Amino acid sequence: MTLIDDGDAERIYADLGPATEASGGSAANTAACLASLGASVEFTGKVRDDGLGRVFTHDIRAAGVRFQVEPATAGPGTGRCLVMVTPDAEKTMCTNLGAGALLSAADIDADAIASARVLYLEGYLCGKPETDPAVERAISVARDRGTLVALSGSDPAWVELKRAALDALLDRVDIFFGNEAEACGLTGTDSADAALVALSHRCQTVAITLGAHGSIVAQGSEVVSVPAAPVTQVVDTTGAGDSYAAGFLYGVVRDSGPERSARLGAIAAAEIVSHLGARPLARLSDLAATAGVTA
């Protein structure tokens, strides 16, 4: 993943061949997958009053997610990520955070956080002077009102760039999500197992995804390993971690325990990687029921 500005985004887009356009965004993908599982979910993020912003707003609301933040009327455009996927499903991402990097404390819906079981934060918001007040406001409300706080590492490059800021939050995080590279980068370890131990000293629940090898989860003294759900063909891994987090969080709010939560995460991730784009094309609640994994 490489951060790019508006000019880079325009130049790279002009050089691309035919493309598939779809709404995305790390935490927004998780919200859409949670809604597909049957959860009640609200997304807090920032778009501009432009074409991409209107498409994003329509798509996330159509997915069943509450989204009430007013669009920005000035400043950078709606954020976008140009994802180039190779035939083996590996990806290169050029990310322009755009208006999303300007989410403010005033945009935080304290009542929604207070009434929720879980507040889920993406790592991309952490370590930026523009968005740190929003992160602090959200976490403070959650801790004050007994709402669980979950955090995603979001991307290995971001963890490398903002390791200190992410580390500073961990003692106020109940649930941490990350892939192996993110977890190792954050803890300075060289294996998923070592990272799991280090992170579990800070967070009550830690879930580390291992791609085709599934995931490992530590919750208190319990450690479980869950295989990946079967996939006929892996097409695009974009959003795999976002969807895994959604399945796991759905298990959390239904008090399903770490193993069943991880299995729900695996089912959601398997659907996402089977096609281009990071939003579910099939109803995740139906897929979970078919697999016999209900929260």
Image: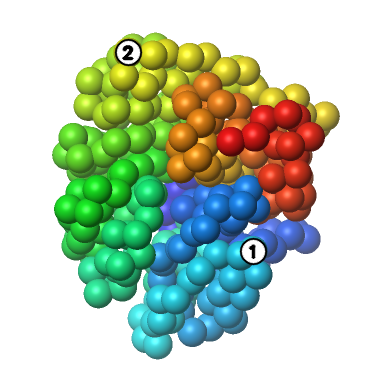
What residue did someone put label 2 on? 221
Residue 259 place in picture, x, y as percent? 52, 22
Cα distance, mark 2 to mark 1? 37 Å
Observer-nearest of 147 and 211: 147
Residue 186 place in picture, x, y as percent? 29, 29
What residue did someone put label 1 on? 63
Instruction: Name which residue type carries label 1.
Output: Ala
Observer-nearest of 21 and 2: 21
Instruction: Write the residue at 67% across / 30% down.
Output: 293
Instruction: Name which residue type carries label 2.
Output: Ser
Residue 225 place in picture, x, y as percent? 52, 14
Say whether disc 2 or disc 1 marks the residue closer to the N-terminus: 1
Under tag 2, what secondary structure? loop
Left or right of 72 in this view: 62:
right
Under tag 1, what secondary structure? loop
Report if residue 5 is visible in the image: no
